[in-house]
Amino acid sequence: MIKILYFARLKESLGKASEEFELPYQNFTIASLMTLLSSRGETWGREFGQGSTLRAAINYDVAREESILKDGDEVAFFPPVTGG
Amino acid sequence: MPVRVQTEDFDTGVEINRMRHSRMDTGAIVSFVGLVRDTNHGSDVTAMTLEHYPGMTERALEEIVAQAKERWDIFDALVIHRVGTLKPMDQIVLVAVSGAHRGEAFAACEFIMDYLKTEAPFWKKEQTSAGERWVEARSSDEVARERWNSDINTYKQ
């Protein structure tokens, strides 16, 4: 089981700040997770599908598409940052 | 290397004085304060809400400060970033850097801001007369960060 967090505009468009997620198989990556999430419906497809500008983090560290997820991880997805 | 994310306002004078009194060989303190403007992309901005990712944001800021300290011969760096709802003229962020001389402190301060704008997980939502909108990331901020990867712009004494 992993925890997925959504931030900012993404949290509003999905109507969800977090969820628990069961990893379906070993070596499941950020890219695999994004593909799976993109199949959940129109908004999810727009956010996580082809050309997505979302950034990902695993346990507070910036993640790449090929980063592998493991049980207990906290994964976050968010739009490009706009602080400062 | 103190890094603070808070809803409360900060007093730049108090922070700089604390830095000034922390060691006697400090010759320069450079500071930057970012403010909420009352206008953006042609709209009146009446308020702004800043969101962050507690835990990751602090870690990202600490990492940026650590990189600045590795790159330049500076004594200390302070980053305070506010979250929550802010109004025009409110302070958003303070970056203060101390060192023996101004050159390295100026460079490190600008480096920290450029990286903060593109790496630290903060998101701004503006309240305007036309409604609410999330601020889009600016490509000019990416350009500002990327120039630090060119040796030409690396200040070294």
Image: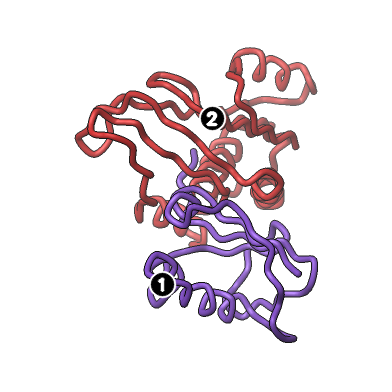
Asked whether, in this view, residue B19 is left or right of residue B10, the answer is right
Q: Tell me how far mark 2 sits from mark 1, CA to CA.
A: 30 Å
* Chain under numbered label 1: A
Q: Nearer the viewer's eye, disc 2 or disc 1?
A: 1
* Chain under numbered label 2: B
Question: B142 or B86, which is in the foreground?
Answer: B86
Asked whether, in this view, residue A80 is left or right of residue A19, the answer is left
Mark 1 surroundings within 10 Å by alpha-carbon count, few (fewer than 14), some (14 through 19), many (20 or more): some
Chain A display color: purple
Residue B87 image-quadrant placement: top left
* A84 to B11, vertically: above or below: below
Residue A71, position as x, y percentages in the image: 79, 72
Chain B display color: red
> Which residue sits at x=60%, y=25%?
B7
> Which residue sits at x=56%, y=38%?
B109
Circle 1 sits on which residue?
A45
* A68 to A72, vertically: above or below: below
Specify whether disc 2 shares its chain with disc 1: no
Circle 2 sits on which residue?
B84
Question: Which quadrant: the N terminus of chain B?
Answer: top right
Question: B69 or B157, which is in the foreground?
Answer: B69
Mark 2 surroundings within 10 Å by alpha-carbon count, few (fewer than 14), some (14 through 19), many (20 or more): some
Say what secondary structure mark 2 lies in: strand
Residue B43, position as x, y percentages in the image: 22, 32
The residue under label 1 is which amino acid type?
Gly
Residue A70, position as x, y percentages in the image: 77, 74
The residue under label 2 is which amino acid type?
Gly
Say what secondary structure mark 1 lies in: helix
For this orientation, the residue located farthest to the bottom is A26
